[in-house]
Amino acid sequence: IKCLVQSEIGSIPLLFPLATIQSSAAAALSVSISVTMSRQDNNSNNMGNDGDDNKRQGTISSARFNLLSSMVGGGSLSLPLAFHQTGNLVAAPILLVVTSVLAQQSILFLVKAGIYSTEARGRRGGDNGEAAALARQNETLSNKKGNASYENVASQAFGPKARIFSMGLVCVCCFFAIVGYAVLLRDMLEPIVDSIVTPPEGMDGGPTFARNVAMLIVVLCISPLTTWKNLTALRNVGALSMASVLTVGLCVAYRSIECQLGVGGSEESGGDNDTNNIRAFPRSMKELLDAVPLFISSYICHFNVLPIHNELRCPTSDRVAQWVRTSLWPATLFYYLIGFTGSLFVKCTSSGSVQGNILLDFDENDPLLLLGRLCLAMTITLAFPMLVIPARDILVRSIMGTRFGKCFLPSVSTDQNTTYDVTAVIPNDIAVPDNGLTTVEFEPMEISQVGALEEPLLALENRSMVSTMQDGSAADGSVSSQQMGASDVDSKAARILVALFVFWSGAAVACSVQSIDVVWDLVGSSFSIMLAFLIPCGAYLKLARRKRFNEVQDDGRGFRKWMISRAVAWIMIFIFAPLMVISTANACYNTFSKDS
């Protein structure tokens, strides 16, 4: 089936019946949409009536850097300890690769669940028939942002109570991550601050007035970035953050190699170097349980998956898979670099082990590691917006649904008769041939979901905010979709106020925290597993079960793929559900044993 659209006059209304491709007979075909256009037309049409704020602007490159910035950071400094505990020669690399594969699959499950949740919301609101399908197709080709969100996925899968629980889960995880990163930032700035202001006698580490002031100054400088509307605007920040953390890894690797060659390190050694330095397997089950949460927490980025996906242009399954694959495998290689080389530094430590923060095992006066500390401080600083924005958006959506939000936040009316820009759906990172013809291929599984595949979340203004409020209101049975569709809410004021509240409250808590190790253990053992694996897999199983049979038919191939995906999701649940219980019990045991 080919739909030829002439766009010589700029933006045109889409009145052709694209919904006809949703028939069961067409579900087995590959659809080509050939759009005749010129590059000049494409550039001019991008200045359509909707404006750039309502359009997807993310490329695979920007999405990759944003996902990496959400995932790779201070937690990678704990991997040398995890490698040392589990066996840096065999067991640790295997655990790292397995965790990476499972994390990739859970991200894809979450994206698919987001797609299915928007379909279910449309059916609940009465969007059925060819007219509704045509509206979704038009919205898809207009390249508009959508409204899939983590809490909406949980709500559609498990009910309204799960919506509240998931909102609290994301906010708690993000808040404690902000606290932990703020404490780690203070630790990285400690040598510089102590060289300027002499700390109180006997105060080797922890909060002091000068250290807290230095940390709060950095928080003040980065605060404006936490008020930006979407993650795509932070794409350059993500690239700089990754360059900084790579520098840290190279510094650690260089000093560890020097240690192996006998160039540097402490004269004292941790016992038998051959035994402590390189191991194939963990010495005890206790060490394995202590290390597993460290591997899992290194891949936690799921609270930003849907926001980033919602900004990605033309998010077909191939492009989404490419984005996830090219994000997590480079992260895995970096984790192996810093984990393996950092674990080798055991040879040059007096304790025979490495600390949870590998940088603490190096000399504070080492100029190379001072550079590493500064780079890590920059990485942590640039990661703050990635942690604030998800919690901020959830709180803003909650406020918008209350009477306070409706009374005190201004609303503006919008024109429902929108003229769509056909060429805006073609992303800039897809090459346009010289003959002016561009072909966008959709897979068979995408034919019946072509409108849903374009669903996004992070845009909190205009259509996205209203649609998300519709979902929450309809789930509670209080307000109908028709009642909510007349106006949109301007969330700029709420976005700024809530972002500053979340960020500065986390920084304030960090000022009184001596060590964040206990919080990391508890959050990494329970909340992270639930957030990253159990809820995405469970939501996918619940929402994918509602798919119509003709949506998974493709001479049996699509149905088999669908069944295999469901089997994988069940396997992941059977793995991570008991692991969460065991790891949480182990973390509690570690906490109370330290206290005793």
Image (spheres, rainbow, N blue to C red):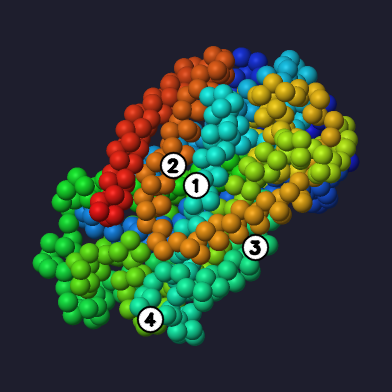
Q: Residues within 10 Å of mark 2 (few under 14, many from 20)?
A: some
Give the labeled residue for mark 4: 201
N-terminal label among 4 and 3: 4
Q: Is residue 360 above or below residue 280?
A: below
N-terminal label among 4 and 1: 1
Give the labeled residue for mark 2: 527
* 131 relative to 162 in the view: left or right: right
* 501 relative to 465 in the view: left or right: left
Q: Distance from label 4 to label 3 (Cα)?
A: 33 Å
Q: Residues within 10 Å of mark 1 (few under 14, many from 20)?
A: some
Q: State the image coordinates of residue 31 (x, y, percent, origin top left).
A: 64, 28
Q: State the image coordinates of residue 457 (x, y, percent, origin top left).
A: 65, 40
Q: Distance from label 3 to label 1 (Cα)?
A: 19 Å
Q: Residue at x 48, y 33 (%)?
A: 536
Q: Residues within 10 Å of mark 4 (few under 14, many from 20)?
A: few
Identity, as a three-letter code, of the amino acid under mark 4? Glu
Q: Are marks 3 and 2 in contact (CB under 8 Å)?
A: no
Q: Residue at x 63, y 67 (%)?
A: 220
Q: Is residue 561 above or below residue 322?
A: above
Which element is circle 2 on?
A: helix
Location of residue 419 (image quadrant): top right
Q: State the image coordinates of residue 90 (x, y, percent, origin top left).
A: 22, 51
Q: Nearer the viewer, residue 317 or 566?
A: 566
Q: Total of numbered circles in the picture?
A: 4
Which element is circle 4 on?
A: loop
Q: Are marks 1 and 2 in contact (CB under 8 Å)?
A: yes
Q: Nearer the viewer, residue 119 or 224?
A: 224
N-terminal label among 3 and 2: 3
| Numbered label attached to residue 223 | 3
Q: Distance from label 4 to label 1 (Cα)?
A: 35 Å
* 452 relative to 66 in the view: left or right: right
Instruction: Please state, as top left, top right, bottom left or bottom right, where the N terminus lies in the image.
Output: top right
